[in-house]
Image (cartoon, rainbow, N blue to C red):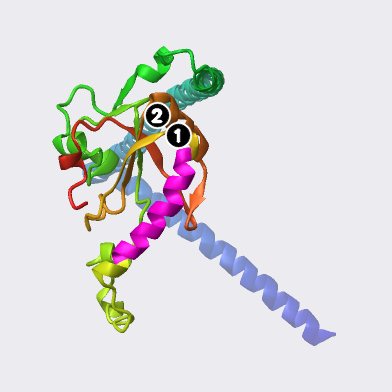
Amino acid sequence: NRRTWRKLVKKQQRHRRRQKQAREREKQEAIEQSARESEPEYQTWLKQQAELEEFKRLTIEHKQQADEEAWLRREALAQRQFQIDAAKHRKEQAEMERLRAQQADELAAMLEEQRMRREEKKRLADKAAAEFEALLQRMHDYMEDTTRCTPPSELQRVLETHPEERLCEFYTRTNCCRYGHSCTFNHRRPMLAKILLIRHFFTHPLLQIGDTHKEYANADAHLEQTPQDLRADYDAFFNDVVDELQKFGKIINFRVVCNTLPHLRGHVFVEYAQERYALRAFVNLQGRYYASRRLNVEFSNLKAWRGAVCGT
Protein backbone atom coordinates (compact mmCIF):
# COMPACT_ATOMS: atom_id res chain seq x y z
CA ASN A 1 0.00 0.00 0.00
CA ARG A 2 1.51 3.24 -1.16
CA ARG A 3 -0.12 5.39 1.49
CA THR A 4 1.23 3.22 4.27
CA TRP A 5 4.68 3.21 2.74
CA ARG A 6 4.67 7.02 2.48
CA LYS A 7 3.65 7.31 6.17
CA LEU A 8 6.51 5.05 7.15
CA VAL A 9 9.00 7.03 5.04
CA LYS A 10 7.84 10.32 6.55
CA LYS A 11 8.14 8.87 10.01
CA GLN A 12 11.71 7.76 9.36
CA GLN A 13 12.53 11.16 7.92
CA ARG A 14 11.13 12.89 10.99
CA HIS A 15 13.14 10.56 13.21
CA ARG A 16 16.35 11.30 11.32
CA ARG A 17 15.66 15.03 11.48
CA ARG A 18 15.10 14.85 15.25
CA GLN A 19 18.30 12.85 15.69
CA LYS A 20 20.21 15.38 13.59
CA GLN A 21 18.75 18.27 15.56
CA ALA A 22 19.63 16.53 18.81
CA ARG A 23 23.22 15.97 17.64
CA GLU A 24 23.50 19.57 16.58
CA ARG A 25 21.99 20.73 19.88
CA GLU A 26 24.38 18.56 21.84
CA LYS A 27 27.27 19.82 19.75
CA GLN A 28 26.18 23.41 20.30
CA GLU A 29 25.79 22.79 24.02
CA ALA A 30 29.25 21.21 24.11
CA ILE A 31 30.69 24.25 22.36
CA GLU A 32 28.86 26.57 24.76
CA GLN A 33 29.96 24.48 27.70
CA SER A 34 33.57 24.62 26.54
CA ALA A 35 33.23 28.34 26.09
CA ARG A 36 31.73 28.76 29.56
CA GLU A 37 34.37 26.57 31.15
CA SER A 38 37.05 28.69 29.63
CA GLU A 39 35.51 31.80 31.19
CA PRO A 40 36.77 32.87 34.72
CA GLU A 41 33.28 33.83 35.86
CA TYR A 42 32.00 30.34 35.17
CA GLN A 43 34.91 28.81 37.02
CA THR A 44 34.13 31.09 39.94
CA TRP A 45 30.46 30.10 39.78
CA LEU A 46 31.37 26.40 39.73
CA LYS A 47 33.61 26.92 42.72
CA GLN A 48 30.82 28.75 44.54
CA GLN A 49 28.40 25.97 43.68
CA ALA A 50 30.85 23.39 44.98
CA GLU A 51 31.35 25.38 48.17
CA LEU A 52 27.58 25.76 48.51
CA GLU A 53 27.08 22.04 48.11
CA GLU A 54 29.82 21.39 50.64
CA PHE A 55 28.21 23.90 53.02
CA LYS A 56 24.86 22.20 52.61
CA ARG A 57 26.46 18.84 53.22
CA LEU A 58 28.27 20.11 56.32
CA THR A 59 25.09 21.81 57.53
CA ILE A 60 23.12 18.60 57.12
CA GLU A 61 25.84 16.60 58.85
CA HIS A 62 26.04 19.16 61.67
CA LYS A 63 22.27 19.12 62.08
CA GLN A 64 22.23 15.33 62.08
CA GLN A 65 25.05 15.30 64.63
CA ALA A 66 23.26 17.90 66.78
CA ASP A 67 20.02 15.92 66.55
CA GLU A 68 21.86 12.76 67.50
CA GLU A 69 23.56 14.48 70.44
CA ALA A 70 20.23 15.94 71.57
CA TRP A 71 18.65 12.49 71.32
CA LEU A 72 21.54 11.03 73.30
CA ARG A 73 21.10 13.73 75.96
CA ARG A 74 17.36 13.07 76.12
CA GLU A 75 18.02 9.37 76.32
CA ALA A 76 20.57 9.92 79.10
CA LEU A 77 18.09 12.13 80.97
CA ALA A 78 15.35 9.56 80.44
CA GLN A 79 17.63 6.80 81.71
CA ARG A 80 18.62 8.91 84.70
CA GLN A 81 14.98 9.78 85.43
CA PHE A 82 14.09 6.11 85.08
CA GLN A 83 16.80 5.21 87.57
CA ILE A 84 15.59 7.95 89.94
CA ASP A 85 11.99 6.76 89.61
CA ALA A 86 13.06 3.16 90.09
CA ALA A 87 15.05 4.11 93.20
CA LYS A 88 12.11 6.16 94.48
CA HIS A 89 9.75 3.27 93.80
CA ARG A 90 12.06 0.88 95.62
CA LYS A 91 12.28 3.33 98.51
CA GLU A 92 8.49 3.68 98.62
CA GLN A 93 8.10 -0.08 98.50
CA ALA A 94 10.61 -0.45 101.31
CA GLU A 95 8.80 2.25 103.32
CA MET A 96 5.46 0.53 102.71
CA GLU A 97 6.92 -2.77 103.80
CA ARG A 98 8.34 -1.09 106.89
CA LEU A 99 4.97 0.51 107.65
CA ARG A 100 3.19 -2.81 107.14
CA ALA A 101 5.64 -4.49 109.46
CA GLN A 102 5.27 -1.65 111.98
CA GLN A 103 1.47 -1.80 111.77
CA ALA A 104 1.58 -5.56 112.15
CA ASP A 105 3.82 -5.18 115.21
CA GLU A 106 1.58 -2.46 116.63
CA LEU A 107 -1.51 -4.58 115.99
CA ALA A 108 0.12 -7.57 117.63
CA ALA A 109 1.20 -5.39 120.57
CA MET A 110 -2.30 -3.90 120.84
CA LEU A 111 -3.93 -7.34 120.73
CA GLU A 112 -1.46 -8.58 123.30
CA GLU A 113 -2.14 -5.53 125.47
CA GLN A 114 -5.89 -6.06 125.11
CA ARG A 115 -5.48 -9.71 126.01
CA MET A 116 -3.39 -8.82 129.03
CA ARG A 117 -5.88 -6.11 129.98
CA ARG A 118 -8.75 -8.59 129.71
CA GLU A 119 -6.83 -11.09 131.77
CA GLU A 120 -5.96 -8.40 134.32
CA LYS A 121 -9.57 -7.22 134.37
CA LYS A 122 -10.77 -10.78 134.83
CA ARG A 123 -8.18 -11.35 137.53
CA LEU A 124 -9.22 -8.17 139.33
CA ALA A 125 -12.89 -9.05 138.91
CA ASP A 126 -12.27 -12.53 140.27
CA LYS A 127 -10.24 -11.06 143.10
CA ALA A 128 -12.93 -8.47 143.83
CA ALA A 129 -15.62 -11.16 143.70
CA ALA A 130 -13.61 -13.35 146.05
CA GLU A 131 -12.99 -10.43 148.40
CA PHE A 132 -16.67 -9.51 148.23
CA GLU A 133 -17.72 -13.07 149.01
CA ALA A 134 -15.24 -13.16 151.87
CA LEU A 135 -16.54 -9.79 153.09
CA LEU A 136 -20.12 -11.03 152.91
CA GLN A 137 -19.12 -14.09 154.87
CA ARG A 138 -17.37 -11.98 157.52
CA MET A 139 -20.37 -9.66 157.64
CA HIS A 140 -22.64 -12.65 158.11
CA ASP A 141 -20.37 -14.06 160.82
CA TYR A 142 -20.30 -10.69 162.56
CA MET A 143 -24.08 -10.39 162.43
CA GLU A 144 -24.58 -13.91 163.77
CA ASP A 145 -21.82 -13.84 166.40
CA THR A 146 -23.34 -11.65 169.08
CA THR A 147 -20.38 -12.23 171.37
CA ARG A 148 -18.03 -10.39 169.04
CA CYS A 149 -17.83 -6.71 169.86
CA THR A 150 -15.42 -5.46 167.21
CA PRO A 151 -16.53 -5.54 163.54
CA PRO A 152 -14.17 -6.89 160.84
CA SER A 153 -11.36 -4.56 159.83
CA GLU A 154 -12.76 -4.30 156.28
CA LEU A 155 -15.91 -2.69 157.67
CA GLN A 156 -13.97 -0.13 159.68
CA ARG A 157 -12.69 1.63 156.58
CA VAL A 158 -13.93 4.99 155.31
CA LEU A 159 -14.43 5.50 151.57
CA GLU A 160 -13.30 8.84 150.10
CA THR A 161 -14.10 10.30 146.68
CA HIS A 162 -11.20 12.80 146.52
CA PRO A 163 -8.75 12.11 149.37
CA GLU A 164 -6.40 14.86 148.18
CA GLU A 165 -9.11 17.56 148.40
CA ARG A 166 -10.65 19.21 151.43
CA LEU A 167 -13.89 17.86 152.87
CA CYS A 168 -17.18 18.92 151.35
CA GLU A 169 -18.82 20.89 154.17
CA PHE A 170 -22.37 20.27 153.00
CA TYR A 171 -21.84 16.52 152.60
CA THR A 172 -20.12 16.35 155.99
CA ARG A 173 -23.10 18.10 157.59
CA THR A 174 -25.97 16.39 155.73
CA ASN A 175 -24.40 13.28 154.14
CA CYS A 176 -25.75 14.60 150.85
CA CYS A 177 -24.45 16.98 148.17
CA ARG A 178 -26.38 18.60 145.35
CA TYR A 179 -23.47 17.91 142.97
CA GLY A 180 -23.32 14.21 143.77
CA HIS A 181 -20.34 12.34 142.34
CA SER A 182 -19.33 15.37 140.24
CA CYS A 183 -18.47 17.37 143.36
CA THR A 184 -14.79 18.34 143.36
CA PHE A 185 -14.49 18.15 147.15
CA ASN A 186 -13.98 15.05 149.25
CA HIS A 187 -16.95 12.97 150.42
CA ARG A 188 -16.18 10.57 153.29
CA ARG A 189 -18.56 7.63 153.69
CA PRO A 190 -18.11 4.85 156.27
CA MET A 191 -18.33 1.17 155.48
CA LEU A 192 -20.19 0.58 158.77
CA ALA A 193 -22.05 2.83 161.20
CA LYS A 194 -25.05 2.82 163.51
CA ILE A 195 -26.97 5.21 161.25
CA LEU A 196 -28.52 4.17 157.94
CA LEU A 197 -29.43 6.69 155.24
CA ILE A 198 -32.23 5.71 152.85
CA ARG A 199 -32.33 8.35 150.13
CA HIS A 200 -35.70 9.76 148.97
CA PHE A 201 -37.55 7.13 150.97
CA PHE A 202 -40.52 9.31 151.95
CA THR A 203 -42.41 11.04 149.14
CA HIS A 204 -45.32 13.47 149.21
CA PRO A 205 -46.74 16.07 146.78
CA LEU A 206 -46.09 18.90 149.24
CA LEU A 207 -42.37 18.07 149.12
CA GLN A 208 -42.30 18.44 145.33
CA ILE A 209 -43.21 22.12 145.14
CA GLY A 210 -41.48 23.77 142.21
CA ASP A 211 -40.75 20.52 140.37
CA THR A 212 -43.99 20.37 138.38
CA HIS A 213 -43.67 21.60 134.81
CA LYS A 214 -45.58 24.84 134.25
CA GLU A 215 -47.53 23.22 131.41
CA TYR A 216 -49.07 20.80 133.90
CA ALA A 217 -49.01 23.04 136.96
CA ASN A 218 -52.79 23.44 137.11
CA ALA A 219 -53.73 19.91 136.11
CA ASP A 220 -54.41 18.87 139.73
CA ALA A 221 -55.30 22.27 141.13
CA HIS A 222 -58.55 20.88 142.52
CA LEU A 223 -56.62 18.32 144.58
CA GLU A 224 -55.36 20.59 147.33
CA GLN A 225 -52.94 19.16 149.89
CA THR A 226 -52.67 20.53 153.42
CA PRO A 227 -50.07 20.09 156.15
CA GLN A 228 -52.60 17.87 157.91
CA ASP A 229 -52.58 15.56 154.86
CA LEU A 230 -48.78 15.54 154.98
CA ARG A 231 -48.84 14.62 158.67
CA ALA A 232 -51.38 11.86 158.14
CA ASP A 233 -49.40 10.39 155.26
CA TYR A 234 -46.21 10.59 157.30
CA ASP A 235 -47.83 8.78 160.25
CA ALA A 236 -48.96 6.00 157.92
CA PHE A 237 -45.47 5.83 156.41
CA PHE A 238 -43.86 5.81 159.87
CA ASN A 239 -46.02 2.98 161.17
CA ASP A 240 -45.48 0.96 158.02
CA VAL A 241 -41.71 1.41 157.84
CA VAL A 242 -40.68 1.31 161.48
CA ASP A 243 -42.37 -2.04 162.03
CA GLU A 244 -40.27 -3.50 159.24
CA LEU A 245 -37.01 -1.81 160.28
CA GLN A 246 -37.36 -2.96 163.90
CA LYS A 247 -37.09 -6.55 162.74
CA PHE A 248 -33.34 -6.02 162.32
CA GLY A 249 -32.68 -4.52 165.75
CA LYS A 250 -33.52 -1.82 168.23
CA ILE A 251 -34.06 1.66 166.74
CA ILE A 252 -33.17 4.64 168.89
CA ASN A 253 -33.75 7.40 166.34
CA PHE A 254 -35.86 7.78 163.18
CA ARG A 255 -35.65 11.06 161.24
CA VAL A 256 -37.19 12.11 157.90
CA VAL A 257 -35.96 15.14 155.95
CA CYS A 258 -38.90 17.29 154.83
CA ASN A 259 -36.73 19.77 152.93
CA THR A 260 -38.14 20.53 149.46
CA LEU A 261 -34.73 20.68 147.76
CA PRO A 262 -34.44 17.77 145.29
CA HIS A 263 -31.18 16.41 146.71
CA LEU A 264 -32.49 16.40 150.32
CA ARG A 265 -36.16 15.65 149.88
CA GLY A 266 -37.53 12.58 151.67
CA HIS A 267 -34.23 11.26 153.09
CA VAL A 268 -34.72 8.89 156.03
CA PHE A 269 -32.09 8.45 158.75
CA VAL A 270 -32.41 5.36 160.95
CA GLU A 271 -30.14 5.07 163.99
CA TYR A 272 -29.81 1.61 165.52
CA ALA A 273 -28.59 0.78 168.98
CA GLN A 274 -25.69 -1.28 167.60
CA GLU A 275 -23.69 -1.36 164.40
CA ARG A 276 -24.61 -5.04 164.09
CA TYR A 277 -28.29 -4.13 163.80
CA ALA A 278 -27.53 -1.46 161.20
CA LEU A 279 -25.46 -3.95 159.20
CA ARG A 280 -28.26 -6.51 159.34
CA ALA A 281 -30.73 -3.91 158.06
CA PHE A 282 -28.29 -2.78 155.35
CA VAL A 283 -27.83 -6.32 154.04
CA ASN A 284 -31.53 -7.19 154.09
CA LEU A 285 -32.72 -3.95 152.52
CA GLN A 286 -30.43 -4.23 149.49
CA GLY A 287 -32.47 -4.76 146.34
CA ARG A 288 -35.83 -4.28 148.04
CA TYR A 289 -38.58 -1.99 146.77
CA TYR A 290 -41.00 0.33 148.50
CA ALA A 291 -43.84 2.13 146.69
CA SER A 292 -42.52 0.76 143.35
CA ARG A 293 -39.11 2.36 143.91
CA ARG A 294 -35.88 0.56 144.71
CA LEU A 295 -34.32 1.48 148.03
CA ASN A 296 -30.98 3.29 148.04
CA VAL A 297 -29.39 2.38 151.38
CA GLU A 298 -26.01 3.44 152.74
CA PHE A 299 -24.27 4.08 156.05
CA SER A 300 -24.04 7.57 157.47
CA ASN A 301 -21.47 9.22 159.73
CA LEU A 302 -23.54 12.17 160.93
CA LYS A 303 -22.13 14.20 163.80
CA ALA A 304 -25.25 16.21 164.71
CA TRP A 305 -28.94 15.92 163.82
CA ARG A 306 -29.66 19.65 163.75
CA GLY A 307 -27.62 20.39 160.63
CA ALA A 308 -28.34 17.08 158.92
CA VAL A 309 -32.13 17.11 158.89
CA CYS A 310 -32.87 20.75 158.14
CA GLY A 311 -36.54 20.99 157.33
CA THR A 312 -37.66 18.10 159.61
Give how far across and how far down residue 242 sits, in percent.
Answer: 42, 46
Q: Residue at x 33, y 80 (%)?
A: 223
Give how far across and how far down residue 180 sits, in percent.
Answer: 27, 42
Q: Residues within 10 Å of mark 1 (few under 14, many from 20)?
A: some
Q: Which residue is mark 2?
A: 81
| Label annotation for residue 173 | none
Q: Is residue 238 above or below residue 204?
A: above
Q: Which of the 4 image quadrants contains residue 219? A: bottom left
Disc 1 marks which amino acid? Phe
Q: Could you say which is closer to the camera, residue 218 or residue 91?
A: 218
Are the two marked residues, 1 and 2, in contact with CB atoms closer than 8 angstroms? Answer: no
Q: Residue at x 33, y 40 (%)?
A: 56
Q: Is residue 134 above or below residue 284?
A: above
| Label annotation for residue 282 | 1
Q: Could you say which is closer to the camera, residue 221 or residue 128?
A: 221
Q: Residue at x 21, y 45 (%)?
A: 309
Whole-number angstrom distance, CA of label 1 to CA of label 2: 83 Å
Q: Residue at x 36, y 17 (%)?
A: 156
Q: Is residue 253 magenta?
A: no
Could you tell me which quadrant the N terminus lies in?
A: bottom right
Most common SS among magenta residues: helix
Q: Which of the 4 image quadrants contains residue 47? A: top left
User: Dot 2 lies on which element?
Assistant: helix
